[in-house]
Amino acid sequence: MGKTLLLLSLLLPLTVFQTYAQPTLSQEQESYPISPQKQRFLGKPVYIRIIKEEKKLELFVKDRGNFQLIQTYPICNYSGGLGPKRFQGDFKSPEGFYQVTMGSLNPNSKFYRSFNLGYPNQFDKEHGFTGKHLMVHGDCVSEGCYAMTNRQIAEIYQFIEYALIGGQPQVDVGIFPFRMTEENMQRYSHSVHYDFWQQLKPGYDFFERTHQPPSVTVANGRYSLESQELLANRKTTDSRNPFAQ
């Protein structure tokens, strides 16, 4: 009897330790399944829009010809306030037009999942802006990136990944300081960033009007979508014209 009690006393601490020291799932092992309602959209083209002032990331998916809003995610954290990122170390989150390719995806990020925005883009480079590794990622911490919760980035990441696998060459990401209505533009008309924001507004308006991502170019150091605007507004019915409406 005494030997039995002694054996139990030796095993009990080990049992308690094993009970409370079970390893938790690593970030790589964590899984956040997408709801059945959203699964039917996986593999379709995707567009991402970020509204800084509201701290919102909007996920649009192309369905029946137009890009429809599937989910709005609250941004957990970003840094630096409104305005473009200009140099490495200013802890500013970028604004402008960016693209995500398959090479931009990092499933093993130290921030759970991440995708690189492609900063600096052509516009940024022409203005001498510097910085690197500007991303949307998990873990809810930011030093210039847009940080989401792990559950949010898992879903966003999967939509982007499936869209790229499905044949979309790149996923466009439009990052705006605020909803670029005439009222908001007037509200910020005295900002030092106003001229820059005027360059972003046509891209914002184009999507609002057409429900298609803007194809933005950079000319003489300025964002432009003039050629796309002309195409969108074309009213000709000439059957010989391949773009005839």
Image (cartoon, grey):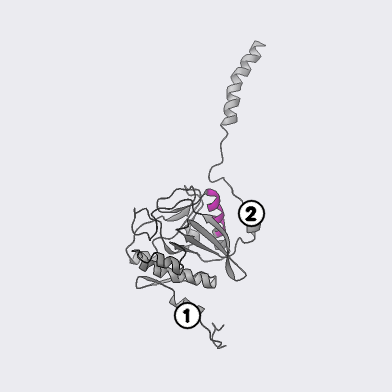
Residue farthest toward the left in the current orientation of the protein: 128
Range drawn in magenta: 150-159
Find out whether residue 103 is within the magenta segment.
no
Residue at screen point 41% across, 61% down = 95
Three-letter amino acid code of the residue under disc 2:
Ser
Main secondary structure of the magenta stretch:
helix
The spot of residue 48 in percent (x, y) is 51, 62
Residue 26 left/right relative to 41: left
The secondary structure type at the circle numbered 1 is helix
Q: Is residue 223 above or below residue 55?
A: below
Placement of the N terminus among the 4 image quadrants:
top right
Residue 228 vertical placement versus 111 (above, below): below
Q: Earlier in the sequence, mark 2 or mark 1?
A: 2
Where is the C terminus found, in terms of image quarters?
bottom right
- The numbered mark at residue 122 is none
Res. 241 image quadrant? bottom right
Residue tagged 1: 230
In the picture of the structure, the residue carrying the numbered disc 2 is: 35
Q: Is residue 20 above or below residue 76?
A: above
- Please, which residue is most extreme toward the right here? 1
The three-letter code of the residue at mark 1 reads Leu
- Which residue shows up at 57% across the image and 27% down it? 17
Q: Position of residue 216 (x, y in %)?
A: 44, 71
Could you tell me how far apart the alpha carbons at marks 2 and 1 are, in whole angstroms?
40 Å
Point 58% across, 22% down: residue: 13
Which element is circle 2 on?
loop
At label 1, counting other C-alpha atoms closer than 10 Å, the crowd grade (few under 14, some 14-19, many 20 or more) is: few
